[in-house]
Image (spheres, rainbow, N blue to C red):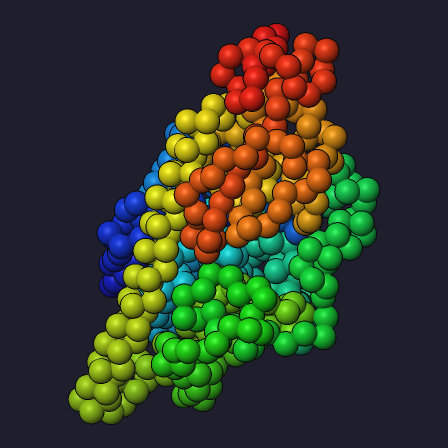
Amino acid sequence: MASGTRALAVVAGLFTAVQLLLVVPGAGIGWDEAVYASQVSPYVPAAFFSAPRARGITFLAAPAAALGQDPVNLRVWFALLSGGALFGSFRVWLAILRPSVVVVAAGLFASLWITLLYGSQAMPNLWVAYGAVVAVACFLLPPSRRAHAGLAAALALVALMRPSDALWLALPLAVAALAARTPVRLVPLAAGAALGALPWVVEAYLRYGGLAARLHRAGEIQGGFGGQFAFGAQLRSLSGRTLCRPCSDVAWGRPELALWWFALPVAVAAGIAVARGRRRPLVLATAAAVSVSVPYLFLIGYAAPRFLLPAYALLALPAAQALVHAARTWRRPAVAVLAVALAGHLAVQYAVLHRAADRYRDLRTAYARTAAELHGLGVRPPCTVSGHEAVRVAYALGCSSRQVGGHDGSIDAAGLRAMACGRPVVLLTAGGTPPPAFARAWRPHGLSPLPGTRTLHARLAPACTDEGGPGGRGRQGHPGGTLPPRP
């Protein structure tokens, strides 16, 4: 076990090092990340927090967000944190499976471009994966106070990150507990899931009018739950698309990048078949992986590769069992074949990771440029940004972001206009989209386009008079006029 711990530490160290070398330098911030980080940042007003989101990841992001707005702070912090979590979560399995299987499983999971890309991001899915790995392992350990505490803590982490994922993870574990006539395990399962989901439930009553209302709104934002088939969308996203919504019109141009996806179920089946005395742990891990995949493959109509990270982490265990068994049984021929396959796998993962990381670097440059252009127009904190990509632009500027419609609608047109009485307010439109009626008279300015846009325009709200009406003169520094003095 000591040798397995050391080997696992090496895998975790390499995982962290690759992130720091290939992903972190120059990386920009994602839209969801900006929402999460803004909740705990002392430098940026909190962005609108929509119904499906849970606040678990914001707690992890808080130490890095306190250091400033630079996305690199988040990247370095999460790269170190995710490396430690990789080691800690798979280490629990050393008491269940052979060390070689556990180390290979951790290496397989850590080598995926999805894991490497999201390891340094303030996003919840990888942490759900770590929680799932620990939960299944603690469930399989002989009943004890320590095992039950670990199971409850792991379920609480998953529920804190994504409450619905905790329910899907707990389902096969509860069935296994009943089948094995060990209902005592249901107590830490229920307690952990309830404790982790409690903040989300409390917020539902405080902000959304109740749990049913929040669930209904979350379903609307997700495009409705049930009767949808997202396998094709997930396949298309494996070429490096971090979000495929909508995905029906996206061509599947690089099928070779998804070969590992088709090989995975074959390796899982083979691993279970050859496991012999260790078959039950691998069957349970596979059942849990299938369960946590259900909502993302059958209940929503779009895809993001990060959604399946918990499934990949769990399926890596039986897949690793198959690889280790082949290497032990057929020796040299198997080792040679596996070495070639591994080299090809790593080459594919690196190619996709490189492109995805470059896109994040381009985003950093583009949003920094947009923020500088708006700053030159007098938009500086306290300020408000609305419209196209308002969340990320606002984060770069240190402004608040508010939308008058859509999933993140949090203000009406009159409220947005009234904000101009105390701060610069800017509306962003892209690709020739005409401004809404309430902003047609606002002062237009052309900006450099953001990635994925042909053109970008800013419309700056006129400043208020001292009586609160639009127009007139005020304090110097606000484009289109000046603002009344702050209290």
Q: Is residue 375 left or right of residue 202?
A: left
Say which residue appears at 72% left-offset and 58% top-offset: 219
Percent x, y for residue 91? 38, 60
Say which residue appears at 72% left-offset and 70% top-offset: 226
Q: Is residue 62 above or below residue 344?
A: above
Count of numbered tags: 0
Quadrant the N terminus occupies: bottom left
Q: Is residue 348 left or right of residue 415?
A: left
Q: Quadrant of residue 228?
A: bottom right
Q: Quadrant of residue 255?
A: bottom left
166 vs 71, nearest the viewer:
71
Quadrant the C terminus occupies: top right
Q: Quadrant of residue 224?
A: bottom right
Say which residue appears at 36% left-offset and 81% top-offset: 256
Q: Is residue 406 left or right of residue 378?
A: right
Percent x, y for residue 238? 43, 71
Percent x, y for residue 169? 60, 64
Q: Is residue 72 visible?
A: yes
234 vs 100, nearest the viewer:
234
Q: Is residue 399 above or below residue 6?
A: above
Q: Is residue 84 visible?
A: no
Say which residue appears at 65% left-offset and 74% top-offset: 298
Q: Is residue 200 above or below residue 237?
A: above
Percent x, y for residue 364? 37, 44
Q: Is residue 148 above or below residue 203?
A: below
